[in-house]
Image: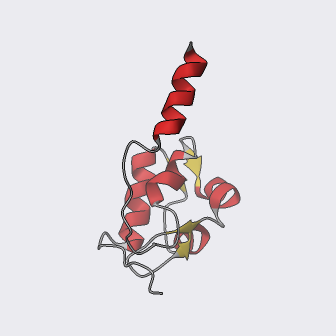
Amino acid sequence: MADEADDEAEEEGPAVELGEGTPVEGAPLARVASRLTWPQEASAVRAKEGDATIRTPDGPQTLGSILDAVDETYFDTRQTFLSEIRAVIGTRPVATAED
């Protein structure tokens, strides 16, 4: 019975229609943060996700290069991590990629 429901859901397509907007390079910071568990040392974050490309207002940057500018060496919570990274990259809107 559950298999039938899964088959029907796949046939219907996505529940939300996605627009034809301009693509944005990199992953949202929150997505990368969700792949980690807390607390974490900055060195552990760098080892696990340092090569991840993050969307920033100034264009895509690797998390490792952003961590270079962060003074904190230990993130006790996800919120602390997000706050420290946003203090470096800012909170302005992210520019879209230009074709």
Residue 72 drawn above or below residue 22: above
- Residue at the image point whose x is 44% and y is 64% from the top: 85
Q: Furthest-bottom residue in view?
A: 99
Q: Quadrant of residue 47?
A: bottom right
Residue 26 drawn above or below residue 1: below
- Residue at the image point whose x is 53% and y is 69% from the top: 26
Percent position of residue 49, x then y: 64, 58
Using the image as rendered, state which of residue 73 and residue 6 is in the foreground.
6
Q: Furthest-top residue in view?
A: 1
Using the image as rendered, state which of residue 23 and residue 50 is in the foreground.
23
- The structure's colour scheme is secondary structure
Percent position of residue 50, x then y: 64, 64
Exactly how many numbered labels are in the figure?
A: 0
Using the image as rendered, state which of residue 50 and residue 74 is in the foreground.
50
The quadrant in which the N terminus is found is top right
Residue 75 drawn above or below residue 84: above
Indicate left or right for 71 with 45 as reference: left
Q: Furthest-right residue in view?
A: 47
- Residue at the image point whose x is 36% and y is 47% from the top: 16
Percent position of residue 99, x then y: 48, 87
- Residue at the image point whose x is 45% and y is 44% from the top: 77
